[in-house]
Amino acid sequence: MDRLRCMEVFIEVARTGSFSASARNLGMSRAAVTKHVARLEDLLGARLLNRTTKQVGLTEAGLMASAGGRQLLERYDAIEADVRESTRTPRGVVRVGTPPAFGTYHMVPLVAAFAERHPDIQVVLSLDTGDANLVAQGLDLSVRITLELEDASHVAQPLAKAPQLLVASPEYLARHGTPRTLAELAEHNCLVHVIKSPTGIWRFAGPQGPASVRVRGTIASNFGDALMQAALRGYGISMHPYYMVSQSLDEGRLVAVLPEYAPDAHDVYVIYSSRQNLPERVRRFITFLRDWARTPPLWSMPRPATPPAPPARLPARRAKA
């Protein structure tokens, strides 16, 4: 028997001074009203009502329970109203997990566009490298970019593809030459992502089918931004999702290497709880992401497999006499 319901029934009896009138007002039988009051008295360990054949009066304990009970019910009604309103009105905080690079380059503009439509909703971006626990970290949803999702305890909505490619700076290629085959990558300084390629093997879909090569280099990292910065500074060849390097490619700061070989593409998912009563603000953000994904962004489509013109080698410097 629900304690809050017992208190509600007792408050009505205290207000009317009658079990019969309370039963009519509450749509209950008189016997049910009596049971609820008796149950509350058992729970509190005190007699709350003095009953006679003509009237019902409050004991001293009943006066205390009545006063405190009214405050309790009023507070509960306010909480219920706030919660119901929050599920209907899009306002409050949405906590979103995201990979760092994708969050920096693409989630920020999306969040800004979402905020223009829903100024009462605050979106908080949090780091999620793919192993975050939504419940433990208090996340409402997360964007995951991966070859395969391992966690099946949440709803996973695919949003877009995230094709990858090899890149290097024109300066690096001018100094070391442009590789013409996958095998030649083994002779270059390759910047390896230790999570995506823990064994140093890069895998591709090539003109003749699947292919792979083991690479190594002087710089490795577990986050892509460090490797991209190293590539921009001319330190080697790196592999990145196109969404990370598209601007640098357009600006000529990076050049696609072996574009006819496509590294394994990742999928972009939004994952969230499978519970039915998601707050409206979370539903709105998920819907916004789905609508955005209906028009594939340019970075989700592979670049044309046309090898770039090889940069000229820098002339060798003559040693001074």
Image (spheres, grey):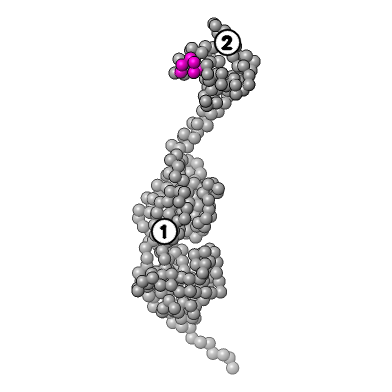
Task: Work out whether 285 lies above or below 62.
Answer: below
Q: Which residue is mark 1?
A: 267
Q: Residue at x 43, y 60 (%)?
A: 147
- Circle 1 packing at 10 Å, graded few (<14), some (14-19), many (20+), is some
Q: Residue at x 62, y 16 (%)?
A: 47
Instruction: Residue at the far top: name it.
Output: 54
Magenta residues (range): 28-33
Question: What amino acid is found at the position of numbered circle 1 in the picture?
Answer: Asp
Q: Which residue is mark 2?
A: 51
Q: Report which quarter residue 264 is drawn in.
A: bottom left
Q: Position of residue 320 (x, y in %)?
A: 58, 91
Secondary element at image label 2:
strand
Quarter containing the C terminus: bottom right
Q: Mark 1 vs mark 2: give the one in front.
A: 2
- Circle 2 packing at 10 Å, graded few (<14), some (14-19), many (20+), is some
Secondary element at image label 1:
strand
Q: Residue at x 48, y 71 (%)?
A: 201
